[in-house]
Image: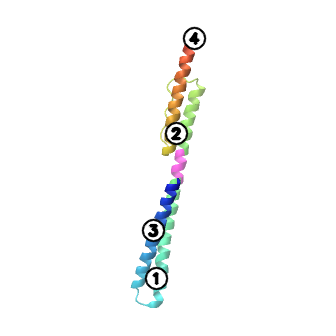
Amino acid sequence: MSPAQQGKAIADITFAVCKVLIVAGLIAWTVKRKGYRLLTFSIVCVIFTTISAYYFFDARQKAQEKSTESNRQLANNLDSLQKFIQNGGVGDIPEFKPTGDTDLMLFCKHLTICIKAIFKLFVKQTLIFRI
């Protein structure tokens, strides 16, 4: 996560906690009996904390699955490139399939362009030496 994304995430979490505390305070304030206001505030905070924890762990699980799938796709891309090179560079250069990571895909796009340029130059040099 970039520093800008980290800052945004921290701001979002802080804003959400403040909203929960304000809502819990308003709900507790509406309770008529004085002895039950703190209890009501505590119960509301526990409920919101439980809900937040559930969604946090759910999002973490989804992020881990997405990362695993992205890594699997990257491994498949590199395997196809390795097979292409081991076969002597015959045929079309394999295209990298999207992994979901924009930075990595940008790198792979530039890597593919470089590989194509290198193989075109290599083929030209090979043809020159054959003549």
Please tell me the numbered disc located at residue 107.
2
Look at 50% across and 75% down and name the residue there.
46
Residue 68 highlighted magenta (yes or no):
yes
**Residue at mark 1 to residue at mark 2: CA–CA distance:** 53 Å
Q: Which residue is mark 3?
A: 16
Determine whether label 3 and label 4 are within 8 Å by CB.
no
Look at the numbered disc 3 and give the secondary structure of its residue. helix
Question: Residue 51: x percent and y percent?
Answer: 47, 69
Residue 84 on the magenta segment: no
Disc on res. 120: none
> Residue visible at 45% across and 68% down?
16
Q: Please state which of residues 116 and 54 is positioned toward the viewer in this rendering.
A: 116
* SS for callout 1: helix
Frontmost of labels 1 and 2 is 2
Magenta highlight range: 64-70
Q: Nearer the viewer, residue 14 or 62?
A: 14
Q: Mark 1 and mark 4: span between their CA atoms?
A: 87 Å
The tally of labels here is 4
Q: Earlier in the sequence, mark 1 or mark 2?
A: 1
Question: Which is nearer the N-term, disc 4 or disc 2?
Answer: 2
- Residue position marked by numbered label 4 in the rendering: 130
Marks 4 and 2 close (CB-CB < 8 Å):
no
